[in-house]
Image (spheres, rainbow, N blue to C red):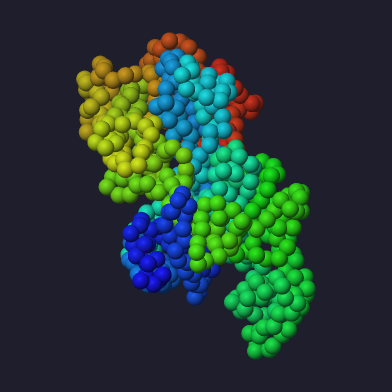
Amino acid sequence: MNIETEKQLKASDQEMVFSLDIGTRSIIGIVGVVEQEKFKVLAIEKEEHTNRAMVDGQIENIDQVAHVARIVKERLEKKLSCVLTKVCVAAAGRALKTEKASFELSMPEVRQVDEETISRLETGAIGNAEAGFTDDEGKNERQFYLVGYTVSQYYLDNYPISSLKDHRGKNLRADVVATFLPSEVVESLYITMHNIGLEVASLTLEPIAAINAAIPQKIRLLNLTLVDIGAGTSDIAVCKDGSIIGYTMATIAGDEITETIMKQYLVDFDTAEEIKFQLEGKKKISFIDIMGLKHSVTVKEISLCITEAKQKLCREIADRILEVNNGQPSAVFLAGGGSKLAGMCKQIAEHLNIDENRVAIAGNNFQISAFAEEYDINNPEYATPLGIAISAGMNLINDSFRVTLNGDNAKLFRSGSLSVRDILMMNGFGYQDLIGRSGTNLVVFLDGKRTVVYGGLSMPAVLKINGVEAKISDIIHAGDVIDFQPAKNGEPAKACVGDIVEDYGQTIFINEEIADINTELKTGDVIVNIGGTKPLDYEENSLEDNKEDVSAEVEENDKNNEEIFTTVVEVGDEKIPKEIKMEESKIPIRFTINGKPMMFLPKDNKDPYYLMDMLEYSGIDFEHPEGNVVIKVNGEAGYFQQKLNNGDIIEIYCEKM
């Protein structure tokens, strides 16, 4: 038996890991096995894209990318005499979206804060963060998957605190920084792999994969940064105190240099790429431009040509590092094809204002986690594909074990323990799916009394782990099966006149027009039952419980301490005025809110109206404000506990940032 056959048989006897790095310029595939707590590389294949099927690391043409991926897969299968059915992949860092947000919970009474309450609080903050991604019309039609989040601050009864667990309080708040991927980025990866007969066994982020190869766990106590400079983007990951603390990306990368060479020397993209990677170790480079003319140009001349573009790239990378790390890191490792460009380490060190020796090409540390008998794996271009394989094979990411959600493999993105809530939000479910809302109330005025018809109750979410009822804060383990039915919001309240009027009089008017008992009501309707006695027993005058606009316009006429509502209705060709007298205690109060006159009945407990009572009528979604909220009364800055007077002019609006 020859060595090659022995290697193939050995590979077939073990659980092989197959990783694909789907880059902007090429696809790299690596197959290997875990031996003696290291990843052993058995085969590597690489194939260039024939056209721009990828843009900045994102799949643009699924068929073309699938074609190239199939070539890599089939070469590996032939080399190893095996059939590959599962693949580990990574999503590009280009599409990451990060947002800061807060969420508050007010409990009915002072009580001890448990894990479930904290989980609900954090879920609300993450939901608010996701809602921050809106288009120009203020609507969000894209679905986002949660990649990870960090709680920057908790508050207990308005006091900042590092941990809420087991403390006692009533009002809670969490400030978070959450990171998401748009669903199309993830789905395009899954569809492409499905088209070539592969099941996605593991999914992570490219910057996390690269750092798992270049910066092993044993040296992550140091504040280190990994920059994977690809063709379209430069992915950045930062570690400190033993864990990855952040990741981001620079929107420019190696293509910026290539395109500069194209424009300067009038060559096609492939020729410009060849010129770029010949700059190291040569004095002159020869090439033919698109006009068919031959050129022989010194490396010094080409280097001067790309100086500005390279400076821009290095400055952008340094700025992103300082931003995500909140200062200078201890050292930086450069990976990816773009890291091979001469002078990159020196210029990035200059922009970071650190010693040049503290910026180096990645590769020296690959051997800590991986090895190969036939390949030189200390190539910075292998950082991502090798990192994907190491991450899955060495169980460095949670998605290397399987969790089932509603019958399908769950998509998992980050390391560390994961709760049910984390997995649900990583798979497209949001806060509204976890916490249902009651239907909107219907609020009308019936014979001068504010009447509320309540919306339907929400149907709570159903959550089970391995067939047993669970909580969203429960920790998930390998092999768990999650069944989740999202919460359903309650139906909005609906009613017609006959539903709220018990004793009909001579005539019923709605908003000054004749109506009958079958007329459907809408919030804000003013109903007058001429000759009737009383309404049905619906809750009345509970302004604090209602979130709807209950404005009603009337004509006022002070007369002997009585308020007279004059309603003019048309009956045939005649206009008949009807007067309804109200007790002094029921005289409405008029405010103008954002230019709209509104009437409110006095509170039953005789308390005045406060400015905070008017917030719900502003039309602002205070869970997702679109800017700084400005509050004014009669042109002056107001405050929540400010008492209001009849006739006050109130302004509540968002000031765009």
Q: 337 or 104, which is in the foreground?
A: 337
* Residue 468 appears left or right of 251: left
Q: 12 or 426, which is in the foreground?
A: 12
Q: 170 or 34, which is in the foreground?
A: 34
Res. 241 image quadrant:
top right
Write the residue at 34% across / 44% down. 403
Write the residue at 42% across / 26% down. 115
Res. 5 image quadrant:
bottom left
Write the residue at 75% across / 53% down. 356
Write the residue at 56% across / 25% down. 162
Residue 631 horizontal/vertical position (percent) = 59, 29
Q: In this view, does 407 lie above or below 443?
A: below
Q: Is residue 41 above or below residue 496?
A: below
Which quadrant would the C terminus be assigned to in this image? top right
Asked whether residue 517 appears in the rendered view, the answer is yes
Residue 624 horizontal/vertical position (percent) = 50, 37
Residue 340 horizontal/vertical position (percent) = 65, 65
